[in-house]
Image (cartoon, rainbow, N blue to C red):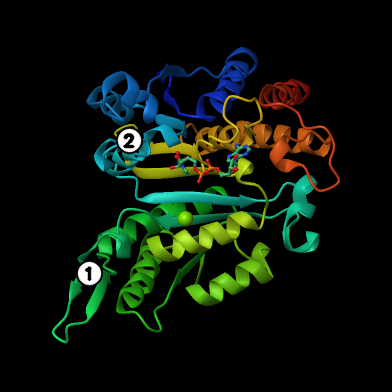
């Protein structure tokens, strides 16, 4: 098999800072595990605008389409706030998601034991938590037509958005969730509001059909999304993979993320259809943005980006055991008490820098051999 390709787009603000630490991890895998990647790097966001006048060039877009996986840092910054909407850094990211047709957004909620007291929930409820929310990302109420604000026949202003899903859109994100479940706890819970929404009735039917025909060995349950929100706060460990639509997924993934602590810890993946080599098109990125308030100061937590690379190992490169190793290395440095500034509790202490955190994770990888 040829060397898998990885396109790195560090972007703006803390993006390049956290990506420098990921490069250390990638180099470690090459040197110590003989895991080679054909790595190339390019520009996205404000930095691409500065150089080329657009937040993503056609050449970079083409490279992203070809790559086995794309790893992105973050985009944006106050110096770009007054740009025309079509030139804003965020448009570069949106173009990637849209043209790669990344319909399946994976947001894990994973609680590292050392940070369990950081949660707003009791340690018991979150310690050891490891669940995955799969959010449909390219359809639903954020895209459905008709939409807009107009004046109706009574002379009143009226706002309209439309929840619309076709069965193929539901089926493909359901497949993505079942595939993930097979590599995890083999359990999927699908969430909608079939009690009050026809699109939810269809959602439930199609997910059940895909299950019965293609994944009968995976355990499937259905839940109303509002009840799902309650259950996520009450006893999140009952779940393995949750699959839901764009709107409910937006809310539920933010709720689930906050069960576990800081923005600096949260990775994500967005997956599309399988390519010729069987791998899904994939973009991995931390959930956080470019953090202009701390950029250039060595304060950023690189863990969200490092864990995004761990997801790439697992979901694009079939290296689940190496992904486990990397996550265990992160767990180890946290257990040893290392904290970047965003992870400091009220009791204080001395935070480590971005590069000290990266180096410590590399050392923990060494110790795992
Ligand atoms: P943000 O995520 O950049 O920052 C929010 C807060 O969290 C800040 O106080 C920041 O210092 C802190 N923070 C974020 N990541 C951190 C990390 N790794 N380590 C330590 N602290 C961290 O969100 P904000 O401030 O709303 O947006 C800043 C810029 O980033 C804007 O231009 C926004 O458009 C862009 N943005 C880009 C995203 C992306 O590239 N996917 C996502 C969200 C925002
Ligand atoms: Mg959101």
Question: Residue at (65%, 68%) from the top-left corner?
Answer: 233
Q: Earlier in the sequence, mark 1 or mark 2?
A: 2
Q: Residue furthest left?
A: 153
User: Which residue is more in the foreground, 232 or 211?
Assistant: 232
Compared with residue 220, is residue 355 higher up or lower down, i.e. above or below?
A: above
| Residue topped by disc 1 | 149
Question: Residue at (79%, 59%) from the top-left corner?
Answer: 123
Residue 140 visible in the shown view? yes
In the picture, the quarter occupied by the N terminus is top left
Question: Residue at (68%, 32%) from the top-left corner?
Answer: 325
| Crowd tier of the residue under label 1, counting other residues whose Cα lies within 10 Å: few below 14, some 14–19, many 20 or above | few
Q: Nearer the viewer, mark 1 or mark 2?
A: 1
| Crowd tier of the residue under label 2, counting other residues whose Cα lies within 10 Å: few below 14, some 14–19, many 20 or above | many
Compared with residue 112, is residue 163 higher up or lower down, i.e. above or below?
A: below
Q: Do the residues bearing badges 1 and 2 touch, measured as CB atoms within 8 Å?
A: no
- The answer to which image quadrant residue 202 occupies is bottom left
147 lies left or right of 1: left
In the picture, the quarter occupied by the C terminus is top right
Compared with residue 40, is residue 264 higher up or lower down, i.e. above or below?
A: below
User: Which residue is more in the foreground, 356 or 283?
Assistant: 356
Q: Secondary structure at mark 1?
A: strand
- The answer to which image quadrant residue 87 occupies is top left
User: Which residue is more in the foreground, 276 or 325?
Assistant: 325
Q: Secondary structure at mark 2?
A: helix
Residue 75 visible in the shown view? no
Question: Residue at (22%, 69%) from the top-left corner?
Answer: 149
Callout 1: CB less than 8 Å from ligand 2: no
Compared with residue 185, is residue 337 higher up or lower down, i.e. above or below?
A: above
| Residue topped by disc 2 | 92
């Amino acid at each position: 098999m040829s060397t898998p390709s990885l396109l790195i787009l560090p972007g703006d603000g803390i993006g390049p800072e956290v990506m420098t630490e990921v490069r250390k991890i990638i180099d470690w895998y090459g040197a110590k595990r003989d895991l080679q990647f054909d790595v190339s790097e390019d520009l996205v966001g404000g930095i691409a605008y500065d150089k080329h006048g657009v937040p993503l060039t056609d050449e970079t877009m083409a490279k992203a389409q070809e790559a086995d996986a794309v790893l992105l840092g973050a985009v944006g910054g106050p110096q770009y706030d007054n740009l025309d909407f079509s030139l804003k850094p965020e448009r570069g990211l949106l173009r990637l998601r849209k043209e790669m047709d990344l319909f399946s957004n994976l947001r894990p909620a994973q609680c590292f034991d050392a940070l369990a007291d950081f949660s707003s929930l009791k340690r018991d409820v979150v310690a050891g938590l490891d669940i995955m929310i799969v959010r449909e990302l390219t359809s639903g109420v954020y895209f459905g037509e008709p939409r807009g604000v107009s004046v109706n026949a009574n002379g009143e202003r009226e706002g309209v958005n439309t929840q619309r899903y076709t069965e193929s859109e539901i089926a493909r994100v359901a497949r993505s969730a079942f595939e993930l479940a097979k590599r995890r706890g083999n359990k999927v819970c699908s969430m909608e509001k079939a009690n009050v929404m026809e699109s939810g009735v269809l959602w439930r039917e199609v997910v059940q059909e895909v299950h019965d025909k293609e994944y009968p060995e995976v355990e499937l349950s259905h839940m109303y999304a509002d009840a799902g929100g309650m259950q996520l706060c009450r006893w999140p460990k009952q779940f393995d993979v949750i699959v839901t639509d764009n709107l409910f997924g937006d809310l539920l993934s933010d709720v689930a993320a906050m069960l576990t602590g800081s923005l600096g810890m949260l990775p994500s993946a967005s997956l599309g259809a399988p390519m010729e080599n069987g791998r899904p098109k994939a973009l991995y990125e931390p959930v956080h943005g470019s953090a202009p308030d701390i950029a250039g100061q060595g304060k950023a937590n690189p863990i969200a980006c490092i864990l995004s690379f761990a997801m790439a190992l697992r979901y694009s490169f079939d290296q689940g055991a190496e992904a486990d190793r990397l996550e265990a290395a992160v767990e180890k440095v946290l257990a040893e008490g290392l904290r970047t500034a965003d992870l400091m509790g009220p009791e204080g202490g001395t935070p480590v820098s971005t590069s000290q955190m990266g180096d410590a994770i590399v050392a923990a990888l060494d110790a795992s051999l």
